[in-house]
Image (spheres, rainbow, N blue to C red):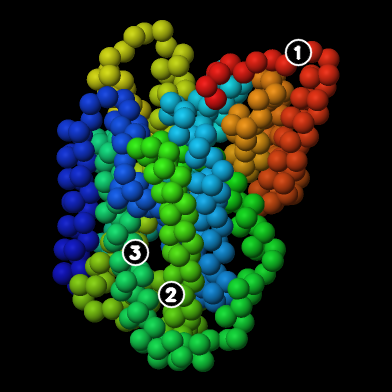
Amino acid sequence: MTSLDLIIVLFYFAMLIGVGVYSSKKIGNESDYLVAGRRLGYGLYVPAMTAVVLGGASTFGSTKLGYQYGISGLWLVGMIGLGILGMGIFFTKKLSKLSIFSVSELLGNRFGNRSRYISGLVMAVYDIMVAVTAVVAIGVMFSALFDWSSATAILVGGLIVVFYTMLGGMWAVTLTDVIQFWIMFIGLIGILIPVGIYHAGGTTGLVNQVSPEFLNLTNIGGKAIFAYFLLFFFGMMIGQDIWQRAFTAKDEKILRKGTIYAGILCIIYGIAGAVIGMVASVVVPGLDDPQQALPQLVIKILPTGLIGILVAAVSSAVMSTASGTIMASSTIIVNDFILFRSTKNRTEKEKIKLTRIVTLIVGCIAVLISLVLQDIIVALDVAYAILSGSIFIPVIAALFWKKVSAKVALSSMVISAIVVIADLIIEGVSSLNAIIWGIVACALVMGIGTLVQNKNTPVVEEVNKNV
């Protein structure tokens, strides 16, 4: 990178820190800090929701798959987008009526405290591990940009995210995500795709130079498409970072339509990533590591200045995920464990101070895990399998099935979690069957348990009549 490119990137990072400082002055109460005061309109909500979903895995993953399989590389991010669409279509009417801060708070209100603690623990660990993957990705980029050691790059990059997230809370995360959204979409779709297609000989030249299979939507294989469905579709609809962003919407209309728009934008982003990967397969063929498709294409075809913008765009994708998941994990710890169990009456300022401290601690834990953990994929796979396999059905029941009792719901979560972990031990952490068997076990326990209970005893009323 040239000096101009580095200046652009450094200016971008300084701007993020500035947003955190600015946002800290806009925080008046706990709702401001955790859910941006529940007053976002389309202009802030749609890009913020889109950015928290699209991270480094989405960006590098879709371009890698596009490099290997062509247009069918869109399915990874496409399934993420479909999950967001599903939440927008099926969940938003219910979510708009809830005055809560977390998924586990919903389960606690509906099924009791033990359900709240179990789901809260799973959610908090899951979000921390997702944050770790993002911090590691930030470290990789910083290491390449500035020729730093891996440890130094992770520390500096991770602490930038932790700093602006801790200061401004959801307001800072929202404002930075909006900036990151526009940089991502302008950089990758507005600049890299047209310039890349030009260097590939235009649309006709690109089509003529790639293998015919690259134009087939199912080239990646039905098994891979189904795997992405299991991994991302269910998890997107119940993720704490996604729900917490949903609670920032001003009203039901913005929540519903804005979430649907965000899902559509995610699918567009997935298509764009696959196209970029296809372009890279023509412009920079023969790469040993397909994950290098995006950076190698940027270096190959873009002039000084634009390289800096594209580096900022990729950094945006990664940082938006890190900030959102750090915020999500700290919210659960404060809301569902500390404040919920405490008998002390705290003022709004005391609550904000407590949440800032926990956010700082969670962020630092994510950075430390990034420094010492050699394989984050193992922990992430386990957390993701338990999240989708044991919590998805209880969330559906909490929102839509009034006859399920607290005892039955808790039993379904515990038994399905045991099934998921047992399958991961037997088949390995990469097993997709763990999610399938977990969902099946959870549904069977809940269905049979509810039928037996309703037959023998009166229906147990829900704890919270508003759910």
Residue 284 appears at what percent x and percent y?
43, 83
Q: Which three-letter amino acid code belongs to the residue tagged 2? A: Ile
When asked about the image quadrant of residue 368, the answer is top left
The residue closer to the viewer here, 149 or 454, is 454
Q: Quadrant of the C terminus?
A: top right
Question: For residue 12, which quarter of the picture?
Answer: bottom left
User: Taking 426 as reference, is 223 above or below it?
Assistant: below
Name the image quarter holding residue 203.
Answer: bottom left
Report crowding for label 2: few under 14, some 14 to 19, many 20 or more residues within 10 A (C-alpha): many
Q: Which residue is mark 1?
A: 458
Identify the disc placed on residue 185. 3
Q: Is residue 165 visible?
A: no
Q: Amino acid at mark 3?
A: Phe
Quick one: label 2 or label 1, which is nearer the N terminus? 2
Rendered residue at 79%/19% (across/down): 453
Q: CA distance from mark 3 to mark 2?
A: 13 Å
Measured as percent of width and height from the top left, residue 117 is found at: 55, 23
Residue occupying the point 22% across, 41% down: 20
Quadrant of the rendering where the N terminus is positioned:
bottom left
What secondary structure is found at the residue carrying circle 2?
Answer: helix
Type of the residue with mark 1: Pro
Dot 3, how many residues are within 10 Å of its Cα: few (below 14), some (14-19), or many (20+)? some
Q: Secondary structure at mark 3?
A: helix
Question: Can residue 356 be seen in the rendering of this structure?
Answer: yes
* Position in image of residue 404 (x %, y %): 69, 24
The residue pinned by badge 2 equals 276
Name the residue furthest front. 253
